[in-house]
Amino acid sequence: AKAIDNLIANMMATLHKEPPIKAVFPKLQDLIDAFPINVKNSRLSLHFNNEQTISLFNDIIAKAFQSAQKNAHRAMAMNNLKQIAIAFNMYAEDNKSELPDNINQLLPYLKDKKILTNPRQPNRDIGFIYVKPAVSIKDIKYPSRCIIAYEYHETWPDNGLCAAFADGHAETIANEAHFKELRE
């Protein structure tokens, strides 16, 4: 038991020195404090501070839920943008390869107007920005790199920006520099 206690103490001391570990687990010290380990008469015992343990697990669960919710909203935004990209292509097919002047002209090609609402910006009626190319859809040189719609955000989102492309696909763009490169 003393050997295990020494091993755990050494591991914890090492973990405290590693900045990346602290960045990933900012509440590491709280976790360590919530489960103090004691050795007495060659017995290893673990004591729980119930209030601190409950608080810590509530924080962990809340962060996990928030992360899952953000990922779900991003997936929904991607789905909406994919449907919007398909609607753009259907519109172009019906209109001699020309794209609409505004995103509202896609409504006859969408199942529901709610598709134009971005789940990550639910207070906006239209949560996506339309970027009409200067040429018809058939004349776009690299349609898989030509953004035709993207999410509206006032600042760059932490987990990337979702965009739809002229070839009909949608993807998350991880950083702003790559987004600007694609917009050029």
Image (cartoon, grey):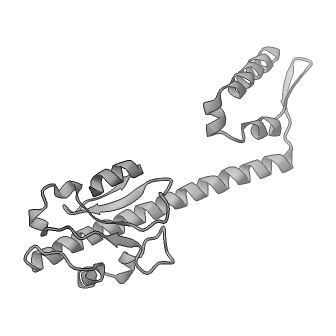
Residue at the far left in the pictured view: 96
Front residue of this view, candidates 33 and 176: 176
Residue 138 is situated, as x and y percent measured from the top left of the image, at 9, 65
Q: Which residue is drawn at 37% across and 55% down?
A: 172
**Image quadrant occupied by the C terminus:** bottom left
Q: Quadrant of residue 131?
A: bottom left
Front residue of this view, candidates 68 and 46: 68
Residue at the far right in the pictured view: 41
- Above/below status of 40 relative to 168: above
Q: In which quarter of the image is residue 170?
A: bottom left
Q: Which residue is drawn at 37% across and 71% down?
A: 128
Residue 29 is situated, as x and y percent measured from the top left of the image, at 76, 36
Q: Which residue is drawn at 81% across and 40% down?
A: 34
- Left or right: where 128 falls relative to 13: left
Front residue of this view, candidates 151 and 5: 151
Residue 181 is situated, as x and y percent measured from the top left of the image, at 30, 51
Residue at the far top in the pictured view: 3
- Above/below status of 10 relative to 113: above
- Above/below status of 103 relative to 1: below
Q: Which residue is drawn at 74% across and 23% down?
A: 13
Q: Quadrant of residue 126?
A: bottom left
**Image quadrant occupied by the N terminus:** top right
